[in-house]
Image (tube, helix red, strand yellow):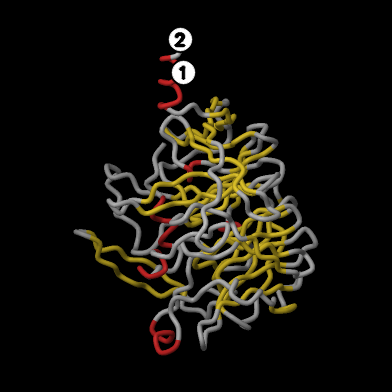
Amino acid sequence: MPRSAFGLAVLLLAALSAAALGQAGSTAASGSQPAEAPLYRVSFVRGDAVSGISASPAIKLPFQCTSDGTIFVSFVSTVPADSGLPPPPPGLPPMLLTSVSPAGLGKTFRLDQVPELYISSEEDHFASDSDVIFLVRASRENKPVKRTYTVGSYHVESAENAAEQHLYIVTFSREGEYRRTIEIGDAFRILQIAVFPSGTFLAFGYDAKDHSPKLAMLKEDGALLKFLEIPKGDAPESIISGADAPRAHAIAPTELVPEGRSILVVQKDITFPLLEVSEGGAVRAIHPKLPRGEQIEAAIPADQNLYVIAGQETGTGRSEEIIYEMSPGDGTALRRLLLSDGRTPSDLACVHDGKFLSMDYRDGKVVPLIGSAEPAIREDQQKGGQSQR
C-alpha cells in the first residue's frame, strides 16, 4: 500500500522539538516495567471494490471511523508527472474526504459545493454518527488577487482571495449533503474540532498571547460555552513558550478521536496521558502502561477498549511501531498486535465488532480489508515445538 501521503499528515501539524521526541513513555510505576501483553497477528481478507468513488495514490492520515465501522479518508489531489500540466501553487494540495461504509458504499464530501462561502483551506474534519464537520478558513466574499509562483521551470499564476478570513464550522449529513455553516469567534486559536452526540463541539487550540494550550466546549451555534479544567500535569504541552511564542506557534501534535459518547484527546510522541472528555465537560486522564521508552503516536478508533499505536526509537533512529489494545479504565495493555502482509500500524483505520478494518487504494480503486486477530507464535517457540516432535 502506498504511504506517500504520510508526510502530508505531518505537514498539517506543528513541528515538534527534539526534546519532546526524546521523552519516555508511561510505565506502571516509577522504575517498574508493566508485564508484557500477549502478541497477536492480524490477517486481512479483501472485499469488493467500492463503486462510485475513485482513489488517488496519496492520502492524508490518520483515518477516521464512526461507531458503525464506516471509514473516512481524505484523498489528495495530485497532478500526474506525465500530464504536461504545471504543478499546483506552493502549499498543501486540495483534499477530498470520502467515506466507505461496511456495506461497501462510498460517499464524498465536497467543500466546493458549500453555498456563499469562499474556502481558502481545510484545517480539520471530524466524523460523528450523525454528522461530518469541517473546520475551514474562509470568507463570505471573494476579492481575487493574482499571485505568481515559480515552481521549477514553471511560472504558475494563481488567484487568491484577499477578503478577510475567519474560521467556520461546515456541517454535512453522513450522506454527503451540506447542512449549515457556523462562524467561530476568536476567543482562542482553534486547531482541531470535534462534535459530541448532543451537538456541542469540543475544540483544541492555544492562546495567541502566551501560547498556552486550550481545550474548550462550544455551543451548537459556535459560541464559547466554557474552557475545560485539565488535571494538573495532564495538560497538552506547548513546546514554544515565553519569549519564543511571538515567533512560532508550535503545539505538540494532537488529535481528537471519538470514544463512545466521549472524545479522546491524544497528544503524540511525548509523555502525556490520554484525556477522555465527556459530553458534560468532565475530563479524565488515562495513563497508558507502556514499556519503558515507548510513547503513543496515535489512537485508533474502536467500539470496544482502546487501541493505540506506540513507537520506540532504535539505534538507527527509526521508530518501531506496534499496536496495543488497552483497558480504558486504567490503561493496562491487554494485547500487542502486528499486521500481516507488510502492513504498518498506520494502515489500520479502526476496530469494529472485533474486526480490524483497513483499505487498499491503488489503480484508482478503493478495496476494503477486513482483518482478524490470532495469537502469534514466535520463531523461538515454533522451533522449540518442532524439536520436541
Q: Which residue is mark 2?
A: 389
Return the mark for residue 335. none
Instruction: Kindly report the distance in space between the C-alpha atoms of the residues bearing marks 1 and 2.
Output: 7 Å
For image coordinates 49% across by 59% down, the residue present is 25
Taking 268 as reference, is 189 above or below it? Answer: below
Q: Locate residue 5, reporting x and y percent.
A: 40, 49
Disc 1 marks a residue whose amino acid type is: Gly
Which of the pair 380/256 is nearer the observer?
380
Q: Are marks 1 and 2 in contact (CB under 8 Å)?
A: yes
Label 2's element?
loop
Q: Locate residue 42, reporting x and y percent.
A: 53, 32
Residue furthest toward the left? 153
Q: Is residue 191 left or right of residue 102?
A: left
Q: Locate residue 247, reporting x and y percent.
A: 38, 84
Classed neighbour count for the residue bearing mark 1: other residues with Cα under 10 Å, few (<14), some (14–19), many (≥20): few
For image coordinates 67% across by 39% down, the residue present is 352
Q: Is residue 147 left or right of residue 270?
A: left
Q: Is residue 66 left or right of residue 248?
A: right
| Residue 381 in sight in this render | yes
| Residue 99 in sight in this render | no
Q: Quadrant of the C terminus?
A: top left
Q: Which residue is mark 1?
A: 385
